[in-house]
Image: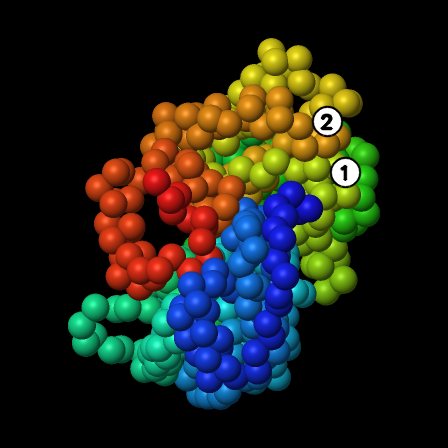
Amino acid sequence: MGRFRGRSTTVLKPKSTHQVSQIMKWCYDKRIGVVPQGGNTGLVGGSVPIKDEVVLSLSNMNNVRSFDPVSGILVADAGCILQSLTDYVAPYNHIMPIDLGAKGSCQIGGNVATNAGGLRLLRYGSLHGTVLGLEVVLPDGTILDQLTTLRKDNTGYDLKQLFIGAEGTLGVITGVSILTPPAPQASNNVILALPSFNNVLPLYQTVKRRLSEILSAFEFIDRASYDLAVKHGQGRALSDDEVAGAECFVLIETSGGRREHDEEKLSDLLENLLEADEPLVNTGVLAQSPAQFSSLWALREGVPEAVSKEGKAYKYDISVPLSSFKDVVDGTREHLRTKGLLHDKAVKHVLGYGHVGDGNLHLNIVADAYLSEIQDALEPYIYEVVASHRGSVSAEHGIGAMKTHALHYSKSQVSIALMKKIKEIFDPRGIMNPGKVLDND
Ligand code: S2G
Ligand code: ZN
């Protein structure tokens, strides 16, 4: 992002859990702040020092500890890169239950620490469900070994859940035990051009009904997102007449057991959609090859990269009712226009994309530079809009350093007080990723 900066003097790159334990014990004794860092692909400043904390990088802990091709249970060091694990389990006909644009550099430990959602949550659920066990080094150096490979273990409080999404503020995740699903025999995708955003919801209902168990992703990109992705060479653009009149697009992925069966379902869906009296879609392009499958995905997955190439991004990863996606984007654009900030020297684009099935909108404001007047126009405006929908100010990217002041828009004071008690129990000296998730007051 190039937005969050720290001033650390030291980066440590331990090779073992024992070394992490020794580091934490030393830092605990000396009351030295520590920022655990995986792939550093976070979007809310969660892995960047705020003052002069030591950076503890897990990059050198990148070994697969075990994989059972029968159960699909993978035990890996936290520093394993997500793409490397995807490549590791593929020959055993398994896939990772999580997939996100940063897979080439994000690490499984960081994915778990931020409870990353990504593109497969609709089908495989959240990491709170697929993570079976964790090995964590606590702030005082104690090693908490909960690295079970049991599918069922109903014995007392499920402590690992506290570390999933804690963003390194309760301890350092050093090992992950995760259930990897069998690879679908066949995956396919189609991109649909819609004349109106209002068609997204009825389309989602139709698609869920017609594709049911083979539906594995239902992603939304508005026209501004699509145009930016194409401008920056992300994926193969549709033809001019295919995009003519399209207000937004939906990318649908199917993952099933038999290619013919899935393709028949998809073709029937497309036929049904296009032959309706009042079609919900203008047109659709069904992937005809693995290359086109990747290229259609790139139109969606490549939006964040296109945004970064276009300018400085103010990213709001929010959960709001599906029906309000467009209003939130349009409302933010109008709000910036009334502030006189919608021009090339300030805000160039306001766009929305995201995971329809998860109710997760990625509202991105692309500016020429990070300016305080843009920041002041966006916050607390956006958080108040989210709160008015009883939504979440962070659907999947976490709180990090960026949103500590905004937690109360989505969590009650009772909840925040309990979180602070838990933080006090695990990190009484406040050395674990200080200034992240919970504010200090
Ligand atoms: C997505 C990726 C991160 C971003 O594309 O689903 O979560 O830049 C995002 O918004
Ligand atoms: Zn996302």
**Residue 382, x across and y down, in percent:** 48, 28
Image position of 403 with respect to 91: above or below? above
Residue depicted at 81% across the width and 34% down the height: 240
Query: Label 1, on which residue?
Result: 310
**Residue 118, x across and y down, in percent:** 53, 55
Using residue 430 as the reference point, say whether residue 196 is left or right of it.
right
Disc assigned to residue 233: none
Crowding at label 1, few (<14), some or many (≥20) Cα neighbours within 10 Å? some
Crowding at label 2, few (<14), some or many (≥20) Cα neighbours within 10 Å? some
Using residue 391 as the reference point, say whether residue 302 is left or right of it.
right
Quadrant including the C terminus: top left
405 and 1: which is toward the camera: 405
189 and 60: which is toward the camera: 60
Helix, strand or loop at label 2? It is: strand
Point out the tag, 1 or 2, that comes first from the N-terminus.
1
113 and 87: which is toward the camera: 113
Residue depicted at 47% across the width and 63% down the height: 32
Amino acid on which the number 2 mark rests in the picture: Lys
Residue depicted at 77% across the width and 23% down the height: 344
Do we see residue 81 in this rendering?
A: yes
**What is the image's colouring?**
rainbow
Using residue 115 as the reference point, say whether residue 89 is left or right of it.
right
101 and 206: which is toward the camera: 101
* Label 2 CB sits under 8 Å from any ligand 1 atom: no
**Residue 428, x across and y down, in percent:** 31, 60
Query: Label 2, on which residue?
Result: 348
Do we see residue 278 in this rendering?
A: no
Residue depicted at 29% across the width and 51% down the height: 419
3D distance between C-alphas at marks 1 and 2: 9 Å
Helix, strand or loop at label 1? It is: helix
Image position of 126 with respect to 158: above or below? above
